[in-house]
Image (cartoon, grey):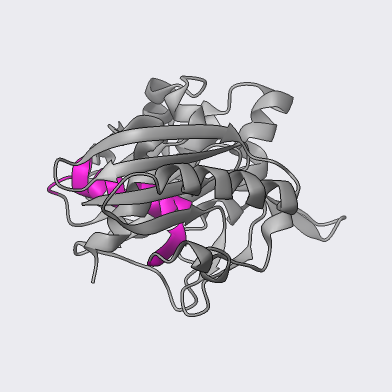
Amino acid sequence: MFYIGIDIGGTKTKGVIFDSKIRRVKKEITIKTPKNKKVFLKQLEKIILEFKKERNIRGIGVGLPGIVDYTTGKLIKAPNAPFLNGWNVKKALRKFKLPVKIDNDSRCFLRAEAKLGAGYGHKNIVGLTIGTGIGGGIIINGKMYQGKTSGAGEFGHMIFQEERKKGKGKSFEELGGKKAFFKFGDRSRMVGMGVANLINAIDPDIVILGGGGINNGSLKMDVIKRVAKKYIMSPLAKKTPIVKGKLGDRAQVIGATLLFNEK
C-alpha cells in the first residue's frame, strides 16, 4: 500500500510516496515553500496530482508547522508560515477523494524516528527539531503525547530570557533557531541548554535531534552534548543519550504517512 506524505516547512515543502509494506520512499518532490497562500495551494495540488498517478494510494498524511486542531482539520497557528493560519487542510484536500490525516511536523519527525529510526525500542522519547523554527514532540509509554489542546512539544516557545522593559521575553526559537544562527552565529550552546532543560523536565530514555540545523551540520552535536551534560541536574540523567535522527530530512514526511498506522 502507498501513502502520500506532505511536510510543510517554513523554508521547504516536501512530498513523498511511501511504500508502507517495505517502508521505503518510492518518489519524492521538494519545493521552496511559497509565502503566498494561493501560490502555495497551486503548488501543493500539482504535487498531489503527480503522486495520484500511482496506483493503490490509500491516503494523504500532512505534517504542519504549528498548532493543529484534529477535530476540524485546521492549522490553528503557524508562527513561521502565518499565511496558512486558519487553513482547513482536510477541507482543502477533500477534492482528491482520499482519507487525510494531519499532525504537527515535529511530532511527525518523532513518530518516524520512534518507529523506524533512532528511537526504535524506547518507550519515553523527546524529539527536538531545529530548522526555520524550533519544535518538538514527546512520547510517553510508547504513545505520542498531544496535550489537552494539542499543543504539547512547542519547545521553541519556551521563554529563555525576560525583557522587562519591553514587557516580553525572548524564546528558545529566537535565541537558538535559524534567524538567530544568521544573526549571532553558531547556536550549539543554546541548543545544548535547551536539551538540558527538556531532560530536567521530562527525564526521557533518549533525546533525538533533527531538522535542518542538525542535518546540514551547522549545529555541532559534540557541543550540544557537552553543554547539556553540564546543565542536567540529575547525575543519572547526565547519561541520557542525545542523538541525531537516523532518517535525515525525510523524517517529518515519513512520519506524516505513518499517521495511518495509528488507531
Q: Residue furthest right?
A: 165
Query: How far from the left and from the top, in percent, is residue 133?
Result: 59, 43
Identified at 44% across, 50% down, the residue is: 106
Tell me: residue 128, above or below residue 224. below
Magenta stretch containing residue 72, yes or no?
no
| Region in magenta | 99-121
Residue toward you, 11 or 53: 53
Give the quadrant of the C terminus: bottom left
- Tell me if residue 232 can be seen: no
- Tell me if residue 132 can be seen: yes
- Quarter of the image holding residue 146? bottom left
For this view, does 115 lie left or right of residue 104? left
- Quarter of the image holding residue 236? top left
Q: How many marks?
A: 0
Query: How far from the left and from the top, in percent, is residue 132?
Result: 61, 38
Query: How far from the left and from the top, in percent, is residue 230?
Result: 40, 34
For this view, does 139 lie left or right of residue 28? left
Identified at 46% across, 48% down, the residue is: 6
